[in-house]
Amino acid sequence: MKRLLLLATISLTACTSAQQDGLARDAAKQAVRPVLAERFPGIPLEPATDCIIDNANAQEILALAADSVTGPTASTAEIVTRIVSRPETIQCLATEGLPVLLGRL
């Protein structure tokens, strides 16, 4: 586990800011998906995950990215729930996730 964290740290230092952001966002998505699947069964995971990541601040992204290494924790669920509760996230879910959900019916 320590090797993985060290490798991730070394990899991030060799990247540009935009690349670091992209890597962190991709890692954060890995921590968000299981929380969504457990807490919001039936929600379209990809659009919902995108809405959450797009409405997370930098600190939340980094915390979620770190959780992707160790696996989701109670803290991960708290962060996701806090982001889901924001008006901007709710709006995103309504415009991006709801059509996907309705298309399944």
Image (spheres, rainbow, N blue to C red):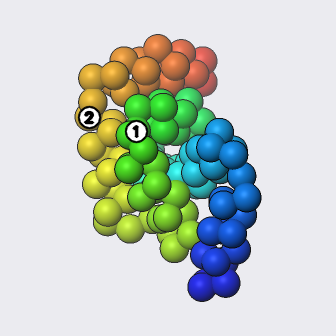
Mark drawn on residue 102: none
For the residue pair 26 and 8, the one nearer the viewer reads as 8
Is the residue 84 above or below the residue 96 in the image?
below
Q: Position of residue 10 (x, y in %)?
A: 69, 69
**Taking 6 as reference, is 62 left or right?**
left
Q: Position of residue 90 (x, y in %)?
A: 34, 24
Residue drawn 38% across and 40% down? 57
Judge left or right: residue 99 versus residue 19: left
Regarding residue 1, the answer to whether it shows in the image is yes
Q: Crowding near pointer 1: few (<14 within 10 Å), some, many (20+)? A: many
Residue 8 screen position, x and y as percent: 66, 68
Amino acid type, callout 2: Ser
Q: Nearer the viewer, residue 96 or 7?
A: 7
Residue at 46%, 14% in the rendered image: 95
Secondary-structure class at tag 2: loop
25 relative to 11, above or below: above
Circle 2 residue: 85
**Which residue is the site of mark 1?**
56
Q: Earlier in the sequence, mark 2 or mark 1?
A: 1
At numbered mark 1, what does the secondary structure look like: helix, strand or loop?
Answer: loop
Q: Quadrant of the C terminus?
A: top right
| CA distance separating discs 2 and 1 | 11 Å
